[in-house]
Every structure is written in structure tokens, then in C-alpha cells.
Image (spheres, rainbow, N blue to C red):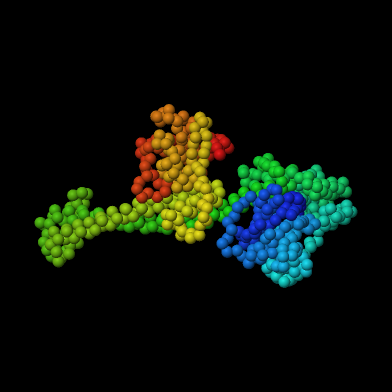
Amino acid sequence: MPFDGLAIKAITRELNSELIDARIDKIYQPERDEIFLSIRQAKAGTVRLVISANPRWARIHISSEKKANPSQPSSFCMLLRKYLEGGKIKEIKQIGMERIVYIRIEALNDFKEWTDKLLICEFMGRHSNIILISPENGLILDANKKYSSDVREVYPGKEYITPPARDKMEPLNDKFQDFTAAMWNQTEDVNIASALFNIYTGLSPYCAREICAAAGLDCSLPVEQCGEYELSQLYNSTRTLITNIDQGIINPVVQYQKNVPLEFTPYQPLTHSPEVVTRDFASMNEACDAYYLQKLSQIRLESMQVNLSRNIKEHLNKAYKKKFLQEGDLSHAQENEKFRVWGELLTSYAHLYKKGDTVAVLNDFYTGEQISLNLDVRYTPIQNAQRFFKTYNKSRGAQKHLEHLMAENQHGIDYLESVLVAVEQADNPAQIEEIIEELEKEGYLKARSARGKNKPERSQPRKFISSDGLEIFVGRNNHQNDRLTLRESDRNDLWLHTKNIPGTHVIISLPPTIKLIDQVPDQTLEEAATLAAFYSKASSSPKVEVDYTFRFNVKKPGGARPGMVIYDNYWTIVVKPNSEILQKLLDYQAD
């Protein structure tokens, strides 16, 4: 991701133009290494400026994202509020081509005098930081990350020292002779893109490759094979690109691959694979915001999916272990069926034996085999038979109780497996939050005490339009499955679900004219069944059986967990989860 000197140059140019004399209304710190400035402009309203010192996602741009304001602000946030709230932004500038931005703010001090404060934003990977200094004496007032190293100390009261300069040249301040000398001074076999990155500050490896493409050169070309002509092309392309950005001649774009953002740049990229698509934006801030909103949301989603899946699998493993032990106990209980047979045999042949006999040799009239039964000499044959029946009846009661426990445990396994499918197929963090809330209500997760006052809007089922123009709805989680099936669908709609496999509920919204199953269009039925198979645990299977029936045949048993239903009078269709039918539906998914 190239949040390099060029991206910063384009962003700060826009910020300096839009936010000069704008007033800082509020400051809050939603993340440990991220602050938001709520800035009120004279005519354009209020915007949020995000400044992040995250080691991986350090950045600055106007953001449309809304984050909750922590109830307890950090000491750094409180100090920023003290010095900067109510202040006016006077200048936002990049230091050379470095990844350092100075924000000069004029604010009232304790004596109601207008004084300058300098908010320094350093975007340098794991060394990223946000530092507030007093320009009068150059002393640090506070910093987001406080540390001490051999190079500098970042603590309140210490003099601010700029990060050590790297041994690189400024692209617009060098001469062609210095450029060629630096390029030819690279080690052997270094390609021109790597060499460009090595000698110039502010360029990312990605940007260096783009400059090579703009110069009409292969980025893998070794420097040692370049003459003055090739180097002059590189030199001029670099200067042209930076000069255009300086003058506001930019073309902000974000590159996507399968709807996943890959890069954002202030120029039209030249080097990308055919499956990558680009989207243009009106400003660099908008491009940056769109990139980070989706990228960070995807990363947060993946993190939540991993953590929640791990938790669910722990519960599943316990349930699987319980099932294994219960099956062993059931097998042992079923073996005690022999005591009933022994009791019946001994009762039938009791007249042949008397009290005091130790063994009874009997012919089993069920199998025709001869068996020997050990008798307790203290009891009569009939009393021994009653003891066999007593053991059998006790075992039979335990077996019934065990079967009930096994059924309960299996219901829990089925439910957790369906939740796991929903987690794996969630599209955004909000949908994961809905699943977490569901698991809290079911007792699988500990309920969180602190919840926002404004609950996020509930997600809606996935909606598709079939080839015949009928609407197909696909649930995203178990609570939504219940709502979709039992509340939102018509009793005469068609309901689909994978056969004996955890998955989602699918509804085909049928017009009133369709009353019989033969009237449902075959193509629509196949498409809906394909969606049911794809959004299930069997999505990677070559063929999947999908049951379908009219909605009025679907019932929810009392006390059943979310998403768990029973149905009768159904038909079954076999489909391929991954097929051209599915791809066509996904490509034209309705909003």
C-alpha cells in the first residue's frame, strides 16, 4: 500500500486548501494510536480528519467513518483538547518528500492569547507517531508514543528532534548528473525500480515501478545495462509526476481485485493485471478514505471471523467429545438388553432349579443356543430372575435419559455448525456483531456489559433476482433465518435448505398466481437451490441435495434454537454449488 511521499503530497495539498482557517471543534481518540479531529469549515460544514500512527496503517486524510468516542479519554487526548480545541488550522504541509506532516494550529492559551502549536505527524511504519510541540521553544508538550533511543528522546519537556534523515536525495532538488551517478553507484544486478527506490526519498517500491512504466522501461531492467537515455527517461518521468502532483494535476484511483482494494494512488496506474479494476475519485482524500474504510473493515472482519470461529470450534470440540462418550455409554447400556432375556429364560425354567443352585444351564429360545447363568445362592430362581429384570429396567431408564441427552447435544452441534457457516460467510464486521449477540443470548459467549446506546441497523438478507424475474432471499445468520422464514415471507412462498447439512434458509418469493409446485419455474428453482448449497457447509462439495417445500410446511418447535426448524411434505433437488448459474447470480446480485 503506497502511503508514500507522493500520496502524502497529494493529500496535504488538498487539506491545506480545504482546511485553512477551519476551526477544531472536538478531538477524540477512538483507538490507542489514532485520533480524530472534528473540524468545522466556514461554508462546507464539519469534516473529520483522521490521523493514525498505527504501525501498519499510519495515515492522514478526511474520513467519513464514525467511531465511538471512548468514555474515558487518554491523557494524550485530554492534552490535545486542552491546547487545540477551538483553535484554527493555519497550515498543513509536508516536509520535503518525507512522510512527515506539520499541522500549524493557532489557539488561545490560558491567558486568552492567540499562540501557535505544532502537531507533527510522522508516518514511518512502526516508528509512526503524533507529537504536539510548542514552536516557541521547540519543546515537546506530549506524544502519542513516548520512547527513548540513541537518536532522540520523545518525552514531554524534551526538545523535538526530527527523525534521522536517510541517505536519499530529494527528487526535485537533484541534478541529472547526481541522479545518474547515484543510479550507476548501485550494486550489481539491481533493477531500475529498486535503484529508484533506493536513491529517492518519498517513493515506495510500487511508485518506483509505475515511474519505470511511465518512462517506457521494464522495471526489472538492471541499472548496469542502462545508458544516459534510459536514465534521462526515468529522471524526467519522476520530475513530471511530482510536479503534476504539486500543481494539483492528479487522477486519484483505487485498484480492486474481486472487490478487495489493493492500492490507491494519485495517478492512473500503468502496471496491473487484467483482473484488477480501477475506480476514479474526485479527490485524493476520498480515494484514501474509500481504500482504508474497506481495507480495514476487511481486516477487522477476518480477525473477528478467526477469533469467533476459534471460540465456536472450542464449544464444538466439547460437544463432539461429549457425543463420543455418550455413544459409548449408550452402547454399554444397550448391551444390558441381555438381562431382560436372562430374566425371561430363568422365569420360564425356574421349576427346574431351586434355592442354593449356583448355575442354571438354559436353552435360549430366541437363538437356540445354550447359555449358563450364574445364580446367587441366597435367592430362589424367581428372585434371581427378578434381579435380572431390575438391572435391565435400571439400564433401560438410563438409556432413555441418555438418548434425550444425546438428542440435546446433537441439537447443539447442529446449531453451532450453522453458526460457524454464518461466521465464515459474513460480509462485514456488523454481521459478525449480530452473530456474537446471538451467541450471547444462547449462553455460548459471556454477555458484554458495555453496549452502545445506538444499536447498528440490522443487516438484511441477501437478495437475488432469478432468470425468471422472481426474488430470492438468502438469510445471513440464524436470527435472520427465523425472521425471513417465519415473519417476512408469505406462507405460500417456497422454502429451501440443504438436506441434513448446516446452512442458511432460502426463500423464493412467489406471486399469488403460483399455487402448485409444478408451476414454479425450473430455472428459478435450480438457481435458488444453488444458492442454498453455496451458502452452506457443503459449498465446496461437487453435488449437494437441497430440500424444498412451501413455507406453510415449515414449523419451529417450541424451545428450538435460532434457525432450527422442522418441515414435511418436501421435495429434493441435486445441484452443483459452484457453477455458471451461481456466478451469474453473484455477478448480478440485487442491492
At 10% across and 56% down in the image, what residue appears? 351
Residue 160, given in percent of the width and then of the height, sits at: 75, 67
Q: Residue 70: x, y in percent?
A: 58, 60
Residue, x 47% and y 55% (percent of image)?
312
Farthest residue, direction front: 112
Image position of 538 with respect to 85: above or below: above
Nearer-the-camera pick, 131 or 116? 116
Q: Is residue 370 or residue 588 the one in the foreground?
A: 588
* Residue 57 shown left or right of residue 240 in the figure: left
Residue 527 lies, in percent from the top left, at: 50, 35
Q: Quadrant of residue 554?
A: top left
The residue depicted at 20 percent of the width and 49 percent of the height is 366
Figure quadrant of residue 555: top left
Number of numbered discs overlaid on the protein picture: 0
Residue that appears at 26% across and 56% down: 397
- Nearer to me, 558 or 453: 453
Which quarter of the rendered picture does the C terminus lie within? top right
